[in-house]
Amino acid sequence: MKKIKSVHFIEKVDEYRCVDRDNDIWESGEWEISQDQIEHLIGGYILLHRNEDDPSYLGGRISDIRSGTKKGRVIFQFAFDYRCIGRNTDSSGWMSEKKYDYYE
């Protein structure tokens, strides 16, 4: 499996939250991710968008992934990174409000 560089999500309901203001650590809402993808996402980036055509408005480097309250869903913990703000991605490859970018 190719190494995942980043995962983009369509986040419309603002379920993310800052969990450590001093270190700018955030948690995402709950997302459905296959178990085999999880190990490839640690150290990669998460970017949140309002829709497929909008630039990202929040994101950072993924430091942890834990089980969510809903079966089959996970919560991402990430360190905010200003370079993840305002990033666009092409419209191809979106599925179920998520898209993966891979290393070449």
Image (cartoon, rainbow, N blue to C red):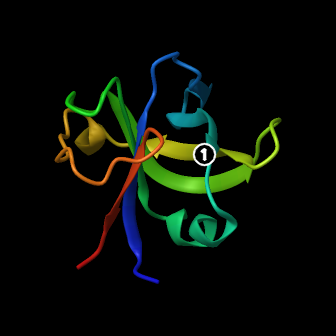
Question: x%, y% of residue 41?
Answer: 52, 64
Question: x%, y% of residue 90?
Answer: 16, 47
Residue drawn at the location 64% of the way across and 61% of the way down: 34
Amino acid type assigned to the residue bearing label 1 in the image: Phe
Answer left or right for 79 relative to 75.
left
Question: x%, y% of residue 73?
Answer: 71, 45
Name which quarter of the figure residue 19 lies in: top right
Question: x%, y% of residue 31?
Answer: 61, 41
Residue drawn at the location 61% of the way across and 54% of the way down: 33
**What residue sits right under mark 1 in the picture?**
76
Q: Nearer the viewer, residue 63 or 31?
A: 31
- Sort mark 1 into few (<14), some (14-19) or many (20+) by Cα contacts within 10 Å: many
How many marks the image carries: the answer is 1
Name which quarter of the figure residue 77 lies in: top right
Q: Quadrant of the C terminus?
A: bottom left
Residue drawn at the location 57% of the way across and 35% of the way down: 28
